[in-house]
Image: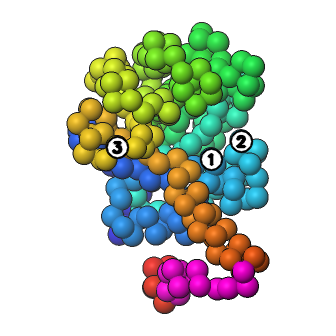
Amino acid sequence: MSQTTADKRRAFRALHEAGCFVIPNPWDVGSALALQSLGFKALASTSAGMAWSMGKADGQVELEEVLAHLTALAGRLVIPLNADFENGFAEAPEGVAANVARAVGTGLAGLSVEDSTGDASAPLYDFDLAVARVAAARAAIDAIDPTVVLTGRSEGFIRGRPDLPETIRRLTAYAEAGADCLYAPGLRDPAQIRAVVEAVAPRPVNVLTPGLSVGEIAALGVRRISVGGSLARTAWGEFLRSAREIANDGAFTAFGRGAPGGELNRLFS
């Protein structure tokens, strides 16, 4: 089934209007096509999974590499793609805007911009700058295609600043600055998740799998569930266990757990 970029963007925006959906994170074209074949309605890139597939640590991939990765994913998928666009690969709002415009040009249906600086001593951008960066991303999107979904991310809970009132203050401001969806990775307590949902309503909220079922998360009012690098970590875990068995034991029993080659060939044919 052929879908234009405009079709995918409309479909992605519609997914955020009601209900709760899972948006799993592939790390390359093959994993994206496999997830698409399972019936998921949309996918999201993972900065960590992408980096590991390139032999780099998370956060070490350059902008040009990310843009090429997004182009490859969006070009093969018939369902919407959301981009983990990290911190916009710039500090100043003008730089974020320029880079977001380039990301939109890859054919994605949505993207997120986070407030993490990458500096452990000051892990979050100052409040006013963080809000200005989201506003700049919104303006850049609107100049090209306002249907692209912008997600505003506040990273305190995974960057050593687990402050719920501050997280809510930031997410609320990001919504006012034009973010369509709000996301604070690292929230695991149901009461905290519900507090965020209620604070930014009626804007939809994304959560990173907090150890609850889809039904339990949906009951909290969450609209979107992502898994980050977890699928990539799972794949790497099995790969490393199999390789260590060969290196340490001279055995190959783990190969019996592998997907049949014929099944993979049929999937990708």
Residue 102 image-quadrant placement: top right
Tell me which label, 1 or 2, sits earlier in the chain.
Answer: 1
Q: Amino acid at mark 1?
A: Ser
Q: Amino acid at mark 3?
A: Leu
- Residue under pointer 3: 212
Tell me which label, 3 or 2, sits earlier in the chain.
Answer: 2
Outermost residue toward the top in this view: 128
Gap between marks 3 and 1 measured at Cα? 23 Å
- Residue under pointer 1: 47
Please state which of the two labelled residues, at mark 3 or mark 1, is closer to the viewer.
Answer: 3
- The segment highlighted magenta reads 249-261
Q: Amino acid at mark 2?
A: Gly
Q: Residue at x 25, y 45 (%)?
A: 215
Do the numbered discs 3 and 2 sit on residues whose CB atoms are within 8 Å?
Answer: no
From this view, report whether residue 219 is shown above or below residue 194: below
- Residue under pointer 2: 59
The residue nearer to you, when weighing 240 against 50, is 240
Please state which of the two labelled residues, at mark 3 or mark 2, is closer to the viewer.
Answer: 3
Q: Residue at x 69, y 45 (%)?
A: 58
From this view, report whether residue 128 is shown above or below residue 213: above
